[in-house]
Amino acid sequence: MSRRSLSTLAGSALALFLAAALTACATPTDPGSAPTPSASGGASDDMGGDIELDAAWLDNGRMIGIVTEGSSTCVPTAGEATYADGVLEVELVDPPADTACTRDLVPRVTLVGVPEGVDPTQTLEIRVTGETYMGDTDLDGVAGLDPSGETEYLPSAGWTGDDGQFVILTWGSSSCVPEVEGVTAADSEVTVTFVTPPADQVCTMDMAPRGTLVQVDGLDDDSEAFAILTGGEFDNIRIPIVGND
């Protein structure tokens, strides 16, 4: 498919899937402690008061990954996002109340399109609201980010405020989100190996943003770190991890 055809297809679907992008947790769950499903929907049944938030710049500042904690199978989606007076306000929306959610408590990422007027080179205050969400965090600006122009639908990565944690943004089928198999660090490079999907896997033919959360330790210099994406649909793709952890 030509870049012009791919861009046309992806552009028509971007607005829909920014609010519905599926996410994947980067650290594999221990099979011996697998969570049990709960019939009570909602990712934050036990959550009260302000919540802890982290965030990362993605796609050259066109997008932000907001990290919350809750059920790994009931990740909130981004509702309305508005920007005024240096503050980005985002509504997080839980799945329907009758959704069966696992009772684990893990970090997970929600992708948010950045409204016009936000300068990713400057510190941004983020306020999150929702039926079960209320909190705020500051996201440091990153020199060189430029959200002008259209996305090129290429992978990108950004550090959150939590040590060793970063978000990877990839583009592809919303029903076939990449799953991390392993993470290793050497010098200033992080190799993220993705699971090879089964040959008979059926994926929707859409182009959606997918967020993957990764945890890594042992980097020599996180300010100039790179992620190497390999395995699955990735063939040793090298991308910078922007910001500082």
Image (cartoon, rainbow, N blue to C red):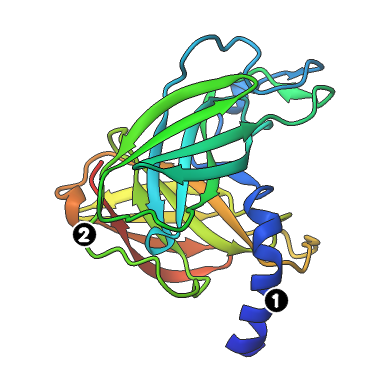
x then y, percent, for residue 60: 38, 63
Q: Quadrant of residue 204?
A: bottom right
Compared with residue 218, is residue 209 higher up or lower down, i.e. above or below?
A: below
Which residue corresponds to the image point at 66% horizontal and 17% vertical from the top-left? 103
**Residue density around tag 2, few if under 14, some if 14–19, many if 20 or more, within 10 Å:** few
Compared with residue 212, is residue 133 higher up or lower down, i.e. above or below?
A: above
Give the side of residue 40 with respect to residue 162, left or right: right
Residue nearer the viewer, 91 or 234: 91
Q: On the rendered image, what quadrant is the C terminus found in? A: top left
x then y, percent, for residue 239: 35, 65
Q: Quadrant of residue 2?
A: bottom right
Which residue corresponds to the image point at 40% horizontal and 56% vertical from the top-left? 117
Q: Residue 115 carries which label?
A: none
Which residue corresponds to the image point at 51% horizontal and 48% vertical from the top-left? 212
Residue 27 appearing in the image: no
Which residue corresponds to the image point at 80% horizontal and 63% vertical from the top-left? 200
Give the side of residue 205 with respect to residue 126, left or right: right
Q: Gap between marks 2 and 1, in whole Å?
A: 31 Å
Q: Which residue lies furthest to the front in this view?
A: 85
The residue beneath circle 1 is 9
Secondary structure beneath label 1: helix
The residue beneath circle 2 is 143
Ranked by sequence position, the earlier of labels 2 and 1 is: 1
